[in-house]
Image: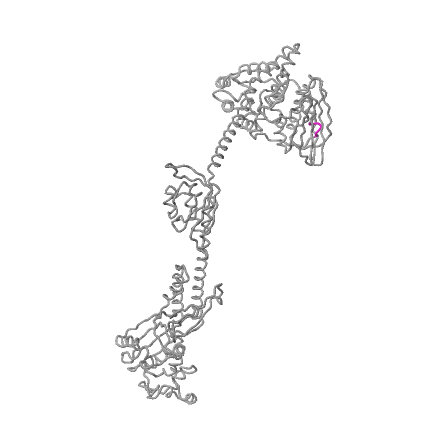
């Protein structure tokens, strides 16, 4: 039988013959099918083809999917243009009109049972990624196919042919297989420790039966397979700092292309990297031996733990002494310290091992079993991950310092500080309570003194003495309450812009009585300067300094008050020629309850809180105060420095008239206080001014009286037994449905919150003991 090529007519002759529409023209295969001498085959000329054959041929030739048709008993072959790359030059174009058994002789043993099954059963079959070697391009090549074999029925409903729809998947299958080989190679070499281990592993992985690599030779060594295609690659040319030449024996049935070459380059990089790791590991082991020797001899507690179970690879004597364990090398952490399983210490070790991030603990409590009992210890840890040269973590290095003694000492200090703070709070509370309790007896004394002035105006000298001593006691109580407020942070400044000269004149007035009685000379050199601050509190500061100077200066002595300013600072100075201050006392002069030496009579004594009050009030104004003295008997100087803010606008307020009108409106007043002396003299005083007064000594009695009488004013003490003044006010309001009665609170406490609570309870005024009678009478006149 002539060959297929001899049965294809000349192309010029084809253009003059009739070409059936189902064949068409314009492509390589359509033109070849049209020019082919089909009469030389069992199919006969195109004009005599059956309708079923024409239809099947038209499907093949018009499809862009690789497809060919086997027809008749001889399985005569027709294929389309999409099959040309897979057929190669060896099969095309001889395969056209050729029988399947002849065209695919090299693998017909694979095809024959599949074709016979389709022809006999009339059922289609599917095969995916099947390796079917094909002779093409001058050699036998490994080719992967995914194809279906579909029966084609003729006009008699018999299977006349097989339609094969095929896709070559070789490249995809090569890539998947090569990636698996790369992964396997990397995993195998990861377990190798030396260069020899790596070479043995590479030789065992690439045997003559391997798909892509038949053998690997190192540095021009002997080739175990002669006659195979070879390629040599140098790792240094692939970017590695390691010079190694690898010669690969190739699979002759796989075309050598760029994909194949890149696969071999990746293999070379993996092998070269493993070699580098082995060289570095050997160097690291040598260095580690020296490093371990250094760690064993260091005086700091050091240990090395390796592996997932944190096995002690090294622990020096200092570490063993700190943790109270010996012979721990080679044992896991949990075995050495079973009491620390689940502890923060073990968690920290594991975290560094797992994350590779170093950690430094400032202070870590550890409960260790030492000498047969659990003891609390405190350590600082410096934890660092240990890495192989390729970055893989294999352990943790631990440096530990025992800080138990320091921590226990600090805890004891903190405990003592807490006790001191508690004592300070108790002291402040005591001072506040003492000031309040001292106000209660002062109230009847002050009121009784007012009564004496009204009843016995001729007895002047005794009243002056009592007045002076009462005022002195009031100042002491006020100082107690002020220092208590400041130490508890209860003082709120009320800043305003004032004239400095006027403010300090008020301070002089507050201390003038003492200067007069001791016949002392006070010089005053203060310019008129605008200053912004709490004028009442600063006048109190200067008055305290003047009073202090007068107390410690002999009769007829000299005291000077002066002031000056710069652009940013105000300086106030009080100087005396009195007793002076010793060098030992000078650093403590502003401390609470500290006093200088004075005469035994203590004629103008104090509690030692005046200068402490000065210091705190000055600091509240963001200023400072200091004392200077050349020594005992050489006088002293106190200097106050305050920040000088830009002056604000000052409005002149007309001074109030000195004369206070007498009571013009008589009231029916209920006075309630459990202090009988206080309430009785208070009632007498109000009665002498024309008011009608009823007294009650407890809340129950007061409510009973109020329910039976009508009152214009009720003055209620807040600190009453069984029912305080706030609750009593609420009950009175319930009885006084017409709200005719005005409520005034009387208390030893005068904080802002105390006054706010009084207003909430319905009081129109909150008076602080001891009450100034003139202020109370003026208040009653306004109601």
Quarter of the figure with residue 30: bottom left
Q: Position of residue 425 (x, y in %)?
A: 52, 28
Looking at the picture, does residue 526 appear above or below residue 396?
A: above
Question: Magenta region, mostly helix, strand or loop?
Answer: helix
Name the one closer to the observer, 239 or 502.
239
Give the number of marks: 0
**In this rendering, position of residue 129 left or right of residue 563:** left
Q: Position of residue 732 (x, y in %)?
A: 51, 22
**In this rendering, position of residue 733 left or right of residue 40:** right
Q: Position of residue 7 (x, y in %)?
A: 37, 88
Q: Which quadrant of the figure contains the N terminus? A: bottom left
Render colour scheme: one colour
Q: Position of residue 606 (x, y in %)?
A: 61, 20
Quarter of the figure with residue 536: top right
Name the one closer to the observer, 19 or 33.
33
Q: Which quadrant of the figure contains the C terminus? A: top right
User: Where are the magenta residues, as a range?
Assistant: 499-503
């Amino acid at each position: 039988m002539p060959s297929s090529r001899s049965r294809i007519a000349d192309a010029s002759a084809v253009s003059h013959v009739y070409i059936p529409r189902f064949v068409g023209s314009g492509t390589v295969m359509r033109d070849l099918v049209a020019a082919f001498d089909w009469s030389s085959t069992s199919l006969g000329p195109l004009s005599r083809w059956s309708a079923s054959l024409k239809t099947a041929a038209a499907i093949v030739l018009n499809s862009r999917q690789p497809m060919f048709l086997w027809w008749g008993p001889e399985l005569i072959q027709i294929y389309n243009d999409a099959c040309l790359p897979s057929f190669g030059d060896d099969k095309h174009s001889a395969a056209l009109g050729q029988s399947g058994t002849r065209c695919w002789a090299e693998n017909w043993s694979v095809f024959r049972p599949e074709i016979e099954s389709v022809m006999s059963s009339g059922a289609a079959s599917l095969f995916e990624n099947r390796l079917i070697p094909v002779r093409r391009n001058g050699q036998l090549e490994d080719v992967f196919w995914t194809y279906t074999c579909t029966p084609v029925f003729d006009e008699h409903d018999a299977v006349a042919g097989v339609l094969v729809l095929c896709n070559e998947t070789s490249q995809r299958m090569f890539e998947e297989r090569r990636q698996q080989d790369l992964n396997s190679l990397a995993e195998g070499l990861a377990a190798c420790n030396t260069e020899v281990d790596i070479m043995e592993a590479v030789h065992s992985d690439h045997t003559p039966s391997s798909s892509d690599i038949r053998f690997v030779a190192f540095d021009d060594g002997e080739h175990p397979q002669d006659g195979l295609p070879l390629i040599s690659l140098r790792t240094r040319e692939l970017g590695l700092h390691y010079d190694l030449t690898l010669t690969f024996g190739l699979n002759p049935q796989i075309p050598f292309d760029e994909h194949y070459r890149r696969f071999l380059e990746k293999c070379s990089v993996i092998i070269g990297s493993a070699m580098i790791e082995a060289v570095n590991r050997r160097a690291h082991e040598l260095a580690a031996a020296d490093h371990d020797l250094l760690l064993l001899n260091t005086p700091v507690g050091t240990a090395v733990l390796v592996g997932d179970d944190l096995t002690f690879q090294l622990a020096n004597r200092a570490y063993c002494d700190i943790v109270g364990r010996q012979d721990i090398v080679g044992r896991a952490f949990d075995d050495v310290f079973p009491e620390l399983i689940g502890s923060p210490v073990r968690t920290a070790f594991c975290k560094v091992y797992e994350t590779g991030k170093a950690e430094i603990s400032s202070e870590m409590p550890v409960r260790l079993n030492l000498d047969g009992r659990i003891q609390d210890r405190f350590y600082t840890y410096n934890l660092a991950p240990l890495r192989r040269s390729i970055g893989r973590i294999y352990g943790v290095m631990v440096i530990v310092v025992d800080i138990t003694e320091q921590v226990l000492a600090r805890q004891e200090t903190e405990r003592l500080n807490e006790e001191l703070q508690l004592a300070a709070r108790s002291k402040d509370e005591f001072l506040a309570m003492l000031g309040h309790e001292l106000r209660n007896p002062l109230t009847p004394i002050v009121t009784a003194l007012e009564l004496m002035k009204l009843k016995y105006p001729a007895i002047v000298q005794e009243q002056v003495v009592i007045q002076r001593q009462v005022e002195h006691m009031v100042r002491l109580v006020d100082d107690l309450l002020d220092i208590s407020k400041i130490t508890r942070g209860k003082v709120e400044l009320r800043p305003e812009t004032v004239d400095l000269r006027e403010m300090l004149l008020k301070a002089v007035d507050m201390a003038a009585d003492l200067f007069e009685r001791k016949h002392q000379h006070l010089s005053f050199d203060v310019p008129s300067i605008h200053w912004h601050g709490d004028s009442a509190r600063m006048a109190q500061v200067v008055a305290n300094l003047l009073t202090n100077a007068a107390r410690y200066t002999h009769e007829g002595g000299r005291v000077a008050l002066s002031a000056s300013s710069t652009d940013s600072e105000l300086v106030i100075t009080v100087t005396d020629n009195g007793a002076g201050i010793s060098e030992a006392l000078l650093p403590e002069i502003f401390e609470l309850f500290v006093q200088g030496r004075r005469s035994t009579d203590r004629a103008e004594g104090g509690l030692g809180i005046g200068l402490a009050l000065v210091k705190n009030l000055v600091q509240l104004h963001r200023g400072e105060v200091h004392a200077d003295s050349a020594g005992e008997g050489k006088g002293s100087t106190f200097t106050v420095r305050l920040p000088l803010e830009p002056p604000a606008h000052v409005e002149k307020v007309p001074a109030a008239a000195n004369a206070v009108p007498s009571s013009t409106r008589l009231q029916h007043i209920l006075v309630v206080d459990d202090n009988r002396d206080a309430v009785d003299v208070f009632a007498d005083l109000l009665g002498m001014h024309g008011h009608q007064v009823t007294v009650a000594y407890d809340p129950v009695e007061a409510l009973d009286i109020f329910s039976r009488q009508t009152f214009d004013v009720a003055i209620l003490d807040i600190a009453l037994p069984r029912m305080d003044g706030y609750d009593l006010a609420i009950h009175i309001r319930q009885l006084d449905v017409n709200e005719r009665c005005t409520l005034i609170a009387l208390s030893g406490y005068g904080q802002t919150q105390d006054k706010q609570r009084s207003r909430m309870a319905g009081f129109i005024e909150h008076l602080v003991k001891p009450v100034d009678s003139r202020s109370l009478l003026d208040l009653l006149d306004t109601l």
